[in-house]
Image: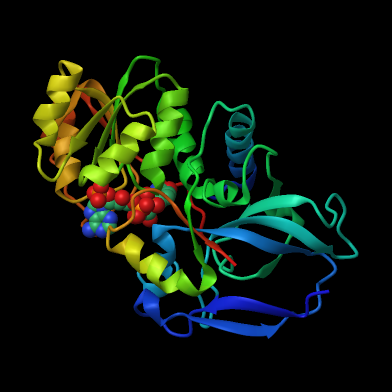
Amino acid sequence: MTNPTANTELMTEVLRSAAEGVLNPIEPESRPLEAAGEAMRDLLDRRVAGKLCLVP
Amino acid sequence: MVTRMRAVVCRELGPPESVTLVERDLPELADDRVRVRVGAAGVNYVDGLFVQGRYQIRPELPFVPGSELAGTVIEVGGAVTGWAPGDRAMASVGLGAFAGEIDLHPAQLTAVPDNLTDTQAATLGQSYATAWFSLTRRTQVHPGEWILVLGAAGGVGLATLDVARALELNTIAAASGPDKLELCIRRGAHEVIDYVTDDLKSRVRELTGGGADIAVDPVGGGHTQAALRSLGDFGRLLVIGFASGDIPDIPTNQVLLRNRSVLGVDWGSGP
Ligand SMILES: NC(=O)c1ccc[n+]([C@@H]2O[C@H](COP(=O)([O-])OP(=O)(O)OC[C@H]3O[C@@H](n4cnc5c(N)ncnc54)[C@H](OP(=O)(O)O)[C@@H]3O)[C@@H](O)[C@H]2O)c1
């Protein structure tokens, strides 16, 4: 999607729903910045259940 | 004041392990930018595609991968209004998030709701925007409808389960292996199917008593046809992606039968 206004609207709706507790995003698994390559590899290789993030 | 920053750098396209962590001087902040200390950067399937050179867009080398983040504003350019040091912010950036700090245009930033952690906020943008766009813009859904979610323990899949629950749909999560299925149950899926060991189409038909109303497909490959065939009257198949690596052909007689629709979803978050 290339319409920036529509994008912003969409995110506003998502974040409002998250703030109101209507949506309930999962707490992801955290890994250090050093593990970036391995994290990308694990996703590509189907080894991840849930979400991943890097914490610098 | 921070003067050095750490960043993950991709110098040449190839396996994701070939990226390196470097430390470099922080440049002076431009007048129209906001500097954010990255609290967390979400890792998405698409980040690996960028590094492998398999994404539609090929970035110029070298680049810092990482497409979404959340953190805290630490410095604000002279021409910027509306943001101040200490504010919590999140952004979808395409590239650059796998770093300690990132300089962004204020229009890229969104305030983080108080009840979300940085790690939650850093991992929700792409997946929830995709799920929300799919179920509120690409098709209309009605409470009580049955939705089948493929790759349900993945990024797009989990977000779709959550959005579907909020929209009062009945959810069937399809994923591989007991760990992923258990996660889907913990995340509120009404029914689960292991689509590697079980027959997807007949299980969905059984569970729904006739066929699903909506199928969401970020996986592709052989599962796409099974998902299409599992749809009931006026069923809609939402094509999101091809995490299996295989772009399937769709038999159009299966679309004609039972008045089904196949809908493309392209919520772009590239740079
Ligand atoms: N169209 C859009 O606007 C849009 C937006 C966001 C993402 N996408 C695309 O959607 C796809 C999924 O993204 P995502 O963030 O949900 O990824 P993800 O978190 O890695 O999840 C993908 C799921 O696909 C399944 N899968 C099946 N075969 C696989 C294989 N050979 N390799 C890896 N995974 C496999 C895995 O579940 P099982 O093991 O349970 O099968 C995995 O959980 C990607 O292709 C992405 O580029 C498109």
Residue drawn at the location 60% of the way across and 71% of the way down: B99
The location of residue A45, given as percent across then percent down, is 27, 63
- Name the image quarter holding the C terminus of chain B: bottom right
Establish if B167 lies above or below B90.
above
Establish if B162 lies above or below A43.
above
Q: How many marks?
A: 0
The location of residue B166, given as percent across then percent down, is 47, 24
Residue drawn at the location 52% of the way across and 68% of the way down: A32
The answer to whether residue B145 is left or right of residue B268 is left
Establish if B269 lies above or below A31.
above
Residue B156 visible (yes or no):
yes
- Name the image quarter holding the N terminus of chain B: bottom right
Residue B263 visible (yes or no):
no
The location of residue A36, given as percent across then percent down, is 46, 70
**Quadrant of the image occupied by residue B169:** top left
Residue drawn at the location 85% of the way across and 54% of the way down: B84
From the viewer's side, name the closer residue of B98 and B212. Answer: B98
Q: Which residue in the rendered view is the most extreme toward the right?
A: B78
Residue drawn at the location 73% of the way across and 53% of the way down: B107
**Quadrant of the image occupied by residue B260:** top left
The location of residue B5, given as percent across then percent down, is 68, 78
